[in-house]
Amino acid sequence: MVTEQALSAAAVRRGVPAAMTRYRVMAYVVGVMLLVLVLVAMPLKYLAETPGPVAVIGTAHGFLYAVYLLAAFDLALRARWSMWGTLGVLLAGTVPFLSFYVERKVTHRMRTGQSV
């Protein structure tokens, strides 16, 4: 969790800690769903000819990715990130394992007061 001591008073008033928590939760959820889709559902579809899991997990991932986009964009606006930093974080949910790495990097930067 981002501590309020690490953030400026203005950032706390803008709601950055709460937005950071929402972003972190969604980054993990989307990352796990993408891994399940790529490592479980897609092999089942192409190797076992069972398309059902891809339909269900793919749809769930798509919906949750939209929620991730909203959470990340909300944090970007509240924390006043650069356009390129925001774009990179938004795209991180599309590459397996990348959302976990970017979430850790964003959390570290936010805790140390650096810009994304």
Image: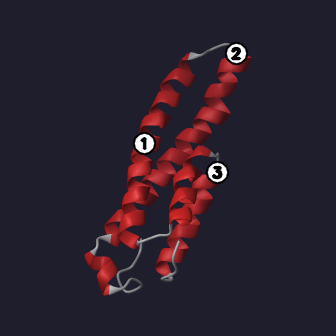
Q: Residue furthest front?
A: 83
Q: Which numbered disc flags the more N-terminal residue, 3 or 1?
A: 1
Which dot marks residue 97? Answer: 3
Mark 2 touches mark 1? (CB < 8 Å): no
Q: Secondary structure at mark 3?
A: loop
Q: Residue furthest right?
A: 47
Q: Secondary structure at mark 2?
A: loop
Tag 2 residue: 48
In the image shown, does 55 or 47 lie closer to the viewer? 55
Query: What is the quadrant of residue 67 in the picture?
Result: top left
Tag 1 residue: 66
Q: Which amino acid, by three-letter code, is at mark 1?
A: Ala
Q: Which amino acid, by three-letter code, is at mark 2?
A: Ala
Q: Quick check: 1 left or right of 102?
A: left
Q: Quick check: 69 left or right of 49?
A: left
In the image shown, does 31 or 81 lie closer to the viewer? 81
Mark 3 touches mark 2? (CB < 8 Å): no
Give the answer, above or below, for where 81 lies relative to 64: below
| Mark 2: few/some/many CA within 10 Å (<14, 14-19, 20+) | few
Q: Which amino acid, by three-letter code, is at mark 3?
A: Phe
